[in-house]
Structure formats: C-alpha cells, structure tokens
Amino acid sequence: MMSLLRDWGLYAVVILVAALAVLVTNRPGNPRVCRILARNVFLLSLFLCFYHLFAVTFLVKVPALADTSGAVLIQHPLSAGSVNYVSLARQDAVAAGIDPDLFVRQINQESGFQPGVVSSAGAVGIAQFMPATAAGLGIDPHDPVQALHAAARLMASYLRQYGSESAALAAYNAGPAALKNARMQCGARWQSCLPAETQHYIAVILG
C-alpha cells in the first residue's frame, strides 16, 4: 500500500511540474519549440499516470502458467517464484536412478502435476500419497517438492524390490499387498489379477 501511495505521489509531482512548465513556456516571446516540448512532457506524464492506474487496478496476475513445452508452472508459497515441477521431477528421477521420462508420465497420470489434488480415495498432492504412506515416509504430501523427491525414491526402491517397471508401478498405485496377491493368484499373468484401474495406469504410463 505504501509503495502504491509513493508511486502516485511521484506521478502527481511530475504532472504538476509539467503543467507549470506548460504555463511558463506559453508566455509570449518564448520559443515555439519550448512550448511544444513542455506540452509533450505534460501529455507523456498524463499517459504514464493513467497507464499505471490501468496496470495496477485492472491487470490480473495469473498464478499458474504453462510454458511452451507443456510443463506446468505453479506459484507455491514455500518457493521463491514459480517452480517447474516437470523439471524437478526429472531431477529427482535421475538422482534416484530411475527413468525420468517414465517418472514424468507417472506423476502426470497421478495428478497432472497439480499439487492441490485430492482423490476420492483420499490420496493427496502431486504424487497422490495416502496420508499413512506419507507419514511412513516422513514427508508432507501437500508439499510438491517433498512429495516428488519421496515418490522418486519410493519408485527406485520398488524397482529394486520387484525387478520391473510394471511391477513397481503396480506397487505404487495399488500397493505392495495387491501386487503380492496378484502374483500369487496369477503367476506370470499377474497383471490380469490387478484392479482394472491399476492395469490402465500401467498401460498408460508404459505406453
């Protein structure tokens, strides 16, 4: 508010000085070029004043924008400026030793890279962690930075434990218990024993 008042005060002074210059140079005997210059300065100061009014009053700041690559930029209160969550997901995937392209497709399938998503089942945030899972990992699922880092590490651990990307995705989406039951019931055809939602999830991400 103080910044706005200071700006308006500065504009008022500029307009006042420009108006006085017009009055002074308008006297008989002053060169014509001085009168023209004074009028132009006055008109310019008026333009800047009204432009400032329009910019401050009517322009709406957009908190979330998409760049040309389709990455979502979202203003997050815990970060300084806009964070490119797709780039962050790639960095976390590389650091965890998993395929960054697959991890980006996974998070896009989970939440569309929207940190505020809550599913009907209660999964929370950009990585769609259930609250109990997030608590076990020691992270805040609402914080996209923490959630992406934890999701990449969890996928890396599932890859080591289950030996394939499809199994790791199944464990992430349906839970390790559901994956174990599917393998016990169907053996090599274990994917057919997963919930239909999880089968679709794996197919979309792996292509």
Image: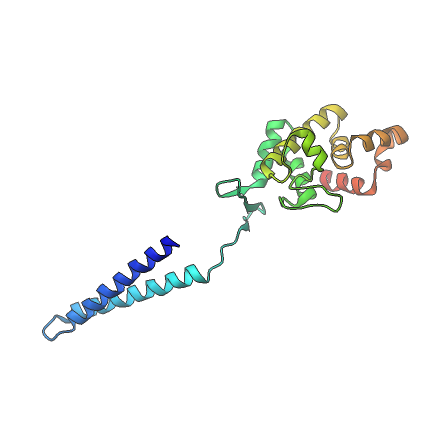
Looking at the image, residue 117 sits to the left or right of residue 43; the answer is right
State the residue at coordinates (67%, 29%): 137
Looking at the image, residue 27 sits to the left or right of residue 150; the answer is left
State the residue at coordinates (36%, 53%): 2
Residue 154 quadrant: top right
What x and y, as percent, mark residue 40? 25, 67
State the residue at coordinates (68%, 34%): 134
Depth order, front residue of 112/20: 20
What x and y, as percent, mark residue 58? 46, 62
| Quadrant location, the C terminus | top right
Residue 26 quadrant: bottom left
As drawn, the residue found furthest toward the right would be 185
| Quadrant location, the N terminus | bottom left
Looking at the image, residue 128 sits to the left or right of residue 186; the answer is left
Looking at the image, residue 162 sits to the left or right of residue 78; the answer is right
As drawn, the residue found furthest toward the top would be 160
What x and y, as percent, mark residue 17? 22, 64
